[in-house]
Image (cartoon, rainbow, N blue to C red):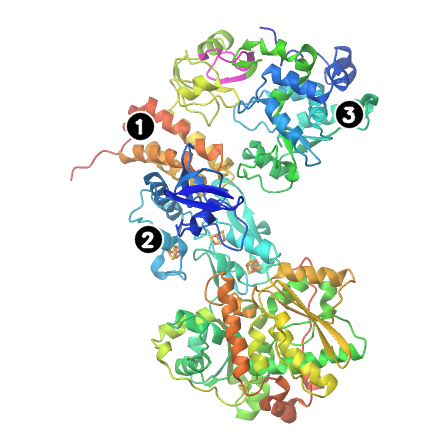
Amino acid sequence: MEELLLKNIRKTNYQNISVYVADGGYQALKKSLFMKPEDILNEVKKSCLTGRSAAFPVATKWSLTRQNSARPKYIVCNADEGEPGCFKDRLLLSRDPHRLLEAMIITGYTVGSQQGYIYIRGEYTNESQIVENAISQAEENGYLGENILGSGFSFHIRVYQGAGSYVAGEETALLRSMAGFRPSPGIRPPYPVKYGYLGKPTVVNNVETLVNIPTIVLNGGDWFSEIGNPDYPGTKLFCLSGNVNRPGVYELPFGVTLGELINEYGYGVRGELKAILPGGVASGLVTDLNIKMDYKSLAKVNSLLGPGVVIVMNKDVDIIAISIHTLEFFARESCGKCSVCREGIRAGLTIMNRFARNEAELGDIELLKTLRRLMYDTANCVLGQAALNATVSAIRLFRNEFESRVRNQSVW
Amino acid sequence: MVTLSINNQKVVVPEDTTVLEAARQINVNIPTLCHLEGLENYGSCRICVVEIEGEPRLSPSCMRTVSEGMEISTNSKRVLKARRMIIQLLLANHAENCPTCERSQNCELQQLAFELGVRENHFVNMVNKVPLDMSGPAIIRDPNKCISCGRCIRMCHQIQSVGAIDFMNHGTDIMVTTALNKGLGNVECINCGQCIHVCPVGAITEKPHVDAVWAAIQDNTKHVVVQAAPSIRAALGEELGLAPGTLVTGKMYAALRRLGFDAVLDTNFAADLTIMEEASELVQRIKNGGILPQLTSCCPGWIKFAEHFYPDLLPNISSCKSPQQMFGSLVKTYYAQQKKVEPAAIISVSVMPCTAKKFEAQRPEMNASGFRDVDYVLTTRELTRMIKESGLDFAGLPDEQADRLMSRYTGAATIFGTTGGVMEAALRTVYKLITDTELSHLEVQPVRGLEGIKEAKVNINGMTVKIAVAHGMANARILLEQIRSGVSPYHFIEIMACPGGCVGGGGQPIGYDMVLRSTRGKVLYSEDTKLPLRRSHDNTEIKEVYKNFLGEPLSHKSHELLHTTYINRRNKK
Ligand code: SF4
Ligand code: SF4
Ligand code: SF4
Ligand code: SF4
Ligand code: FES
């Protein structure tokens, strides 16, 4: 299918504003500035564009922020790509940075904001440099800053680099981090549209979501809504990695099956397929290649689409080790605030290490399931709620591997 | 107003009410750990979760505001199971040693484990032992017991505006510590001990002097003298079988005597002495155009705060030592002379409501007599333990008198123990010093009570003296900023670090309960009204000490023994 998101990444020197402009860049901005903000909002609404992380309608988020009478308002682009196996935003940031800026300026114009921030993950120093350069160029050429293209509208963008925390990718944690606090996910409600950066109404969208905006403005919402899967128009970037022959970023419609993605695009599994993490470390493992990659279908099999991170594992992979690996990741990356998340992960890890040493008790399997239930029920944010998903889905799919690690039952 | 139902009971509450508050209104108790009345909500322990009809997950009631038509269950099977498991998880990463723990029987975790029916733990112990923070002079932190509820942090930041501690690291490595893990003794901690009061478990305690004091008492070559601060008598009974609000002066003397102290004296004597010196200093500053406002100096927590954060205002602070230290330096000079005891043989012990007094006692300059003014400082809690350890039936003890010399006091001294008391006591004597007549109406109501900042104007001989009182360092900061920016209208300001004053000191019976603190304050105000003498300058022992030893207030000898200097600690420990 036609690429909407990746269409520019193979073009050379696209970070240079003159190349971007010569290729039709900033035309959407020019068009927008002649439109009424509510008309742009209307196009976005017609496009049915949803946020690429939690499937929340973009137009709803924008209009809630727009309606809010508090001032100032902020636009924050979440570019804190911290999920293991996720490497799609960095492509867009480094190969097509002006489109992101253009999108943010249009967003600002639409919701009535004059200040945008791009929160870039700490490890992305190159990407952040490229974006900074793009910002200076846009400012020099009048696309950004005071009185943009003589329209009277002003908008500024600043880059904010994180310090490398995964949980800062959660939007309320991200906003706290920007304000100089520990990146701890806040309690919602209130949502950022009402109480965001520095307590002001804030639109938080990620890179992949925002990059669609110029295309929607140029071609119209109706056009966009016809593309791809009618339930979730547009395209999705999938980051395919693990035991596949051709790992990479693939732009496909929502609803593509795992089988198509892995076999047609990834050229098949290296070795014999064992399991797939279809939505990153927080998702549940699956084995069925017919599963469709969209929010509803994955929820049905107790998993998540998440950011579109697909990690393939072959039969050489030890499922116990995988589970421990995800838990070690969460042990490091949880903010550590909630008792259940912090101690639940610690306990989960302790139990899994017993399995690794063949010293587990039979009751440990049930204990892990109860623990996951507790964490889902009581942790504040998705990280804690989902930290044991991989482990418990592994029990469901490979129970025998767990049972075989149970300590020999002693005879009393 | 919003109508909702909690456990099938209807309740109507204002809009921004939390589910927890709504439940409490109808006497439905929901357990809490990280939530504490008086501190901001934090939402970390999750023990307060409730089930809300129609929601996929449980919700923390301390953070959740009510909405119309909510149907809540606070005790469904799912909720109770979750709570038990949370306690189990917390205990699994807790260096549990209840029988030998400082906070046993006074520990929220222990109590919740018991009340919520936790009788086993599915999780094995996962504690990864780390060393205790013993670097401070007064406070010990045991990270192995910390459950990361963050109450101490909120106290230190929000109420005390010190910010000595915070969370460090994240995930399972999260811990409460000082900047760069330097330890409480190497940062701006003012030793106020308010964090002890809010800690639900035994993770923060005072540095104990009990064993050293027992050893001194048991050493026949030592003459062990004890002084007890004003606010001890208003709180000591609480954990010894007497109702809060009971004045226990006589039983306190009796208990100290039975513990084996050689002389049972009273800090209140030195409080009267402090008033003589401090009031004279104020009058001198007013008359000679000295630096104003004068700031009180009896609280060592506040003094360290000033040394770190307001070194530019050190000249405003009265040079008077605190009553504890004035008493200490007289014990090793005046008392030693009068009683014909070798100062070297004297061990000077104080009973204080305060952890910062442990810090103050070990300040190097507190040895004008050539000996340490005060050798050991016991908190109210430590004295309570010694009384229990000796098997004394405190409630049944007779009321006794203190020993003579350095123990008689006036009503002015006793109110030192509560916020506003030092101010009130000082005014009684300032009035006399300026007008040479007595103040007829002794009570200054505007400086009483729990308002964070209190102020009043007093007319003395046609001159309007403006005074202010602050307790809790975040409140004090407001007055200090005024001075710094040159707009402070006051002549005299009293500052106490602890909310409520010394009655709420870091060494008092555990709890951040402002109502209880104010009850203790009222005990002192009522003792004041019952005492025959209520003005410091009327104290006969004070008159004697000036006549026989010191000369007069602000004399050379007074300056040598009773006054002190301060250090600029900006960027230092
Ligand atoms: S669930 Fe975990 S990561 Fe999320 S707020 Fe709680 S402790 Fe932090
Ligand atoms: S802090 Fe509480 S639970 Fe922990 S050992 Fe002490 S009394 Fe027991
Ligand atoms: S003693 Fe006071 S200053 Fe020190 S950490 Fe505790 S609350 Fe903060
Ligand atoms: S030291 Fe006490 S008050 Fe502070 S976080 Fe730990 S348990 Fe809570
Ligand atoms: S008391 Fe509500 S989360 Fe701790």
> Magenta includes B255?
no
Is residue B229 visible from the viewing direction of this image? no
Subunit that carries the residue with mark 1: A
Ligand 1 within 8 Å, label 3 CB: no
Identify the residue under disc 1. A402
Identify the residue under disc 2. B114
Q: Position of residue A9 (x, y in %)?
A: 66, 14
Give the residue at x 81% y 75%: B289
| Side (left or right) of B118 relative to A271 | left
Q: Amino acid at mark 3?
A: Leu
Bounds of the magenta span?
A238-258
Q: Position of residue B460 (x, y in %)?
A: 74, 80
| Placement of B363 over or under B331, stated as above or below | above
Is residue A203 visible from the viewing direction of this image? yes
Q: Alpha carbon of mark 3 to alpha carbon of mark 2: how far? A: 62 Å
Q: Residue furthest left?
A: A412
Circle 1: is it few (<14), some (14-19), or many (20+) Cα within 10 Å?
many
Say which quarter of the image contains residue B254: bottom left
Q: Amino acid at mark 2?
A: Phe
- In contact (CB < 8 Å): disc 1 and disc 3: no
Q: Amino acid at mark 1?
A: Phe
Q: Alpha carbon of mark 1 to alpha carbon of mark 3: how far? A: 57 Å
Secondary element type, mark 1: helix
> Magenta includes A249?
yes
Q: Alpha carbon of mark 1 to alpha carbon of mark 2: how far? A: 34 Å
Identify the residue under disc 3. A144
The C terminus of chain B, quarter of image: bottom right
Subunit that carries the residue with mark 2: B
